[in-house]
Amino acid sequence: MFCEVLTGRRPGHLVVDEPGVAAFLDARPVFKGHVLVVPRQHAATLAEVTDGQAADLFGAARRVALALERALPCDGAFVAVNNRVSQSVAHVHVHVVPRRFKDGLRGFFWPRQRYDSDAEAADYAERVRAALAASALL
Ligand SMILES: [Zn+2]
């Protein structure tokens, strides 16, 4: 499924597009601006990812987490991988969820939202891309 997003066969809002790693908006975000960071080469679980690929993956996740603070009204981020258990798509993905202090989330049963429109999702993606580009200049 994520391979289809990466090849354009399934719609998605990319925010990172690099040779080894890509990132795009989760279509059903916990909070708007929720990004999934994935290895470009298909890997179902962490067992199929090399240390080098993991470094690329988490390097991108780190940059996205920092970019969200510039792009959105957010105080920080939740960064996590569900490996096999609770993993809804069999392609390794790092969740980067924008968080606010007192945003009400507790535990791991998190309600999902929907973007009001594809245009709204495109706007969130553009803000994150712009923040990533700005931080690359630092
Ligand atoms: Zn895949």
Image (cartoon, helix red, strand yellow):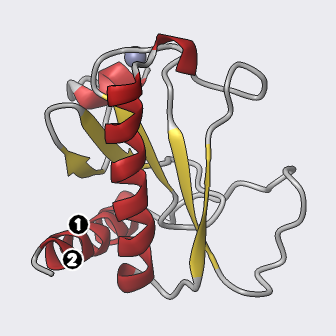
| Residue position marked by numbered label 2 in the rendering | 135
Which quadrant would residue 118 be assigned to in this image?
Answer: bottom left
Q: Nearer the viewer, residue 127 or 50?
A: 50
Closer to viewer: mark 1 or mark 2: 2
Which quadrant would residue 68 be assigned to in this image?
Answer: bottom left
Q: Secondary structure at mark 1?
A: helix
The residue lying at 55 percent from left, 13 percent from top is 47
Q: Position of residue 17 (x, y in %)?
A: 18, 44
Look at the image and tell me in which quarter the C terminus lies.
bottom left
Look at the image and tell me in which quarter the N terminus lies.
top left
The residue lying at 52 percent from left, 59 percent from top is 34
The residue lying at 80 percent from left, 86 percent from top is 102
What type is the residue that disc 1 sits on?
Answer: Arg
Q: Nearer the viewer, residue 48 or 107?
A: 48
Is 26 located above or below residue 40 in the figure?
below
Q: Is residue 136 left or right of residue 125?
A: left
Count of numbered circles on the image: 2
Q: Is residue 14 left or right of residue 77?
A: left
Pointers 1 and 2 in contact (C-beta within 8 Å): no
Residue lying furthest front: 51
| Residue position marked by numbered label 1 in the rendering | 129
Is 81 located above or below residue 80 in the figure?
above
Q: Position of residue 10 (x, y in %)?
A: 32, 28
